[in-house]
Image (cartoon, coloured by chain):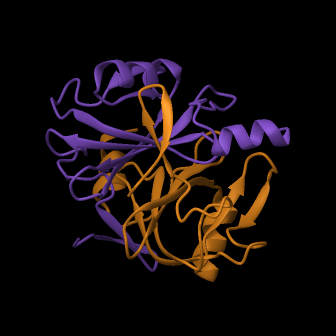
Chain colours: A purple, B orange
Amino acid sequence: MADSANTLCEQGTEFMPKFDDRGLLSAVVVDSESREVLMVAFMDEEALAATRETGMAHFHSRSRGRLWMKGESSGHVLKVREIRVDCDQDALVIVASPAGPTCHTGAPSCFYRVLDGDRLERATV
Amino acid sequence: MADSANTLCEQGTEFMPKFDDRGLLSAVVVDSESREVLMVAFMDEEALAATRETGMAHFHSRSRGRLWMKGESSGHVLKVREIRVDCDQDALVIVASPAGPTCHTGAPSCFYRVLDGDRLERATV
């Protein structure tokens, strides 16, 4: 990237999300109250547009190859409070209020296990 | 995935990181003190192994096509305190102590801007 375009991307006020060669960017969902990381997924242009339009987090499923709204079947939607973007605009932090457990296993967060040596332990916090 | 393999992956104690068709998984770095999201990047098998071996966060650069240690040039390394894994084991949360600003722009976190309508504003928190 040329220096001026780089500066614009990093320091500017223009939102210019950078999708990768698959048309995706990383989206990390953080609980607006606890600030805990709830889940990580990918958004394409369609999912980002749907998220901004509806105020509910939408993603692109790589395995199903389609748009999905988090909570579309469980009802455990993620109401978006804030969207943050990183320096090179290829990743987002979605600050959201969850309507229920975010993980389909029933855990509040998908990150409910900690690596302890070579094994996984249930996280206590 | 068969049901039993799925259960093992989601509920088991075996660490079986799932790299995608490019050999990558998402890694979100969170500050061990503030719990703020500092950066998001990708790890391949080599980067994950180097991270676990050295206790310093390593990633795979997609643009440079190589392993890099965060802070290898700036000195602003990320000392790993904990590694969390999500339900389907294709994303990690790296809880780390940063030795300096994580972002190459000098900001503590790469997510220093918030989307406000169609514009980006400097985050205040």
- Residue B22 is at least partly visible in this image: no
At 51% across and 51% down in the image, what residue appears?
B111
Q: Position of residue B23 (x, y in %)?
A: 65, 47
Q: Out of B112 and B18, give the one closest to the viewer.
A: B112
> In this image, B39 relative to B31: left or right?
right
Q: Out of A7 and B85, give the one closest to the viewer.
A: A7
Q: Position of residue B84 (x, y in %)?
A: 40, 65
At 25% across and 36% down in the image, what residue appears?
A78
Q: Is residue B122 above or below residue A9?
A: below
> In this image, B100 relative to B17: left or right?
right
Q: Is residue B100 above or below residue A20?
A: below
Q: Say how many tags the image has.
A: 0
> In this image, A63 relative to A68: left or right?
right
Q: Position of residue A124 (x, y in %)?
A: 22, 73
At 39% across and 48% down in the image, what residue appears?
B88
- Residue A93 is at least partly visible in this image: yes
Quadrant in which the C terminus of chain B appears: bottom left
The picture quadrant where one finds residue B93 is bottom left
The picture quadrant where one finds residue A9 is top right
The picture quadrant where one finds residue B82 is bottom left
Q: Position of residue B118 (x, y in %)?
A: 48, 25
Q: Is residue A3 above or below residue B85?
A: above
At 56% across and 55% down in the image, what residue appears?
B110
Of all residues, the one furthest to the right in this rendering is A2
Quadrant in which the N terminus of chain B appears: top left
> In this image, A39 relative to B70: left or right?
left
